[in-house]
Image (spheres, helix red, strand yellow):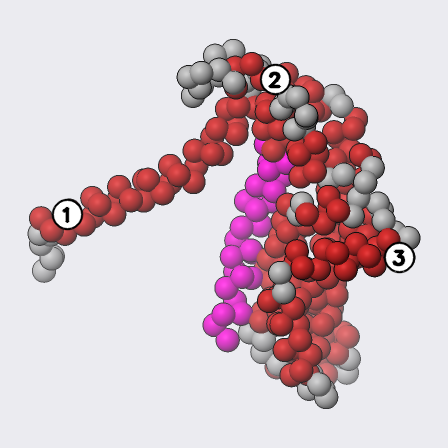
C-alpha cells in the first residue's frame, strides 16, 4: 500500500527542493559569471549596472591569451610541473603502498603514523624553510624546485590512498603468482597494477589538481616570468593601474577546461578509487 503524503511532507519536499536550488545557484553562478565575463570587453565588465549576458560578444580576451607566447608559457609550465609530479607521485606511492599493504617490517606502524601526521601540518608554515632549502641548493626559479616541493605535499596522501585501495585486493592474487614461480615484483606489475586502475586514476587526478591549482609556493619559489604557472599568470594580469578582468576570466576558463575534461573522462575510476579503501 502506497504511503499517503501529508501536507507536511509536501511542504518539507518543497523546502528541500528550494534549498537545493539555492545551493546550486550559489555554486554555479560564479562559474557562469567567469564564463560570461570572458566574452565581454574590459569596459563592459566595469559597466553599471552589470550585464548578465554580454552586450557585445567578443573573443578579444581569448585572442590576447592565445596570441601571447608569454601567457602560453604559463600553461606549459603548469602542465609540465603537474604532469611530472603526477607521474613521480603515482610511481613512488604505488611502490610504497604495495610495501605497506603486503609486507610486515620493523617500524611499519611508526612510519605509517609519520606519513599520516604530515597531513596535519599547514603548508604555509613550511614556506620559509622550503625557500631556504631551495636557495641553498641553488635550484631557485627552476622546475626542480617546484617538482620536489610539490612531491612533499602530494606523496603522503597518495600513499595513504593507494594503500587503502590495495588493502581491498585479496592476497590470494600474490600467492597465486608465487605458486607459479613469480616474484613480488611480478605480482605487482603483472597482476596488481592492471586491476588497480581506479586507485591509480584517483591518485593521479588528485595529484594533478593539487599541483595545477597551487599558488603560494609557485609564487615564492619562482621569480622569472618564464617560470610562472597559470595561477601566478592570472595574478600578474592585476596591474597597478588597471585590471584585465576579461583576460583573467579567459585564462581561468582555459585553465579549467582541461581539468574538467580529465575529471569527466576519469570520473568513474576516480569515484571508485576514492571510495574503495573506505570499506576495508
Looking at the rendered structure, the secondary structure element under dot 1 is helix
Q: Residue 136, which numbered label? A: 3
At 68% from the left and 19% from the top, the residue drawn is 63
Q: Nearer the viewer, residue 273 or 241?
A: 241
Mark 2 residue crowding within 10 angstroms, few (<14) / some (14–19) / many (20+): some
Residue 45 in picture, x, y percent from top left: 52, 19
Looking at the rendered structure, the secondary structure element under dot 3 is helix
Mark whose residue sits in front, 3 or 2: 3
Q: Nearer the viewer, residue 153 or 161?
A: 153
Residue ID for mark 2 = 59
Looking at the rendered structure, the secondary structure element under dot 2 is loop
Q: Residue 10, which numbered label? A: 1
Membership of 259 in magenta stretch: yes
The N terminus, quarter of image: bottom left
Residue 43 in picture, x, y percent from top left: 56, 14
In this rendering, position of residue 105 left or right of residue 166? right
Amino acid at each position: 500500500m502506497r504511503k499517503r503524503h501529508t501536507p507536511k511532507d509536501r511542504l518539507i519536499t518543497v523546502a528541500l527542493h528550494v534549498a537545493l536550488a539555492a545551493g546550486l545557484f550559489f555554486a554555479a553562478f560564479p562559474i557562469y559569471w567567469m564564463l560570461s565575463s570572458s566574452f565581454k570587453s574590459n569596459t563592459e565588465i566595469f559597466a553599471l549596472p552589470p550585464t548578465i549576458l554580454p552586450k557585445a560578444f567578443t573573443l578579444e580576451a581569448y585572442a590576447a591569451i592565445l596570441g601571447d607566447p608569454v601567457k602560453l608559457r604559463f600553461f606549459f609550465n603548469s602542465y609540465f610541473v603537474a604532469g611530472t609530479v603526477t607521474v613521480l607521485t603515482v610511481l613512488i606511492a604505488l611502490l610504497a603502498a604495495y610495501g605497506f599493504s603486503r609486507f610486515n617490517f620493523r617500524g611499519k606502524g611508526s612510519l605509517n603514523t609519520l606519513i599520516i601526521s604530515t597531513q596535519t601540518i599547514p603548508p604555509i608554515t613550511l614556506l620559509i624553510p622550503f625557500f631556504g632549502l631551495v636557495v641553498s641548493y641553488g635550484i631557485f626559479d627552476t622546475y626542480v624546485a617546484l617538482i620536489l616541493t610539490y612531491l612533499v605535499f602530494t606523496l603522503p596522501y597518495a600513499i595513504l590512498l593507494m594503500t587503502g585501495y590495495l588493502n581491498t585486493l585479496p592476497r590470494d592474487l600474490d600467492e597465486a603468482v608465487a605458486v607459479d614461480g613469480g616474484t613480488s615484483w611480478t605480482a605487482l606489475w603483472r597482476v596488481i597494477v592492471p586491476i588497480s586502475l581506479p586507485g591509480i586514476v584517483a591518485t593521479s587526478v588528485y595529484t594533478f589538481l593539487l599541483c595545477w591549482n597551487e599558488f603560494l609556493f609557485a609564487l615564492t619559489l619562482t621569480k622569472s616570468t618564464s617560470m610562472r604557472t597559470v595561477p601566478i599568470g592570472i595574478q600578474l594580469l592585476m596591474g597597478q593601474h588597471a585590471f584585465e578582468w576579461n583576460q583573467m576570466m579567459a585564462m581561468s576558463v582555459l585553465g579549467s577546461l582541461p581539468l574538467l575534461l580529465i575529471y569527466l573522462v576519469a570520473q568513474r575510476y576516480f569515484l571508485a578509487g576514492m571510495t574503495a579503501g573506505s570499506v576495508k
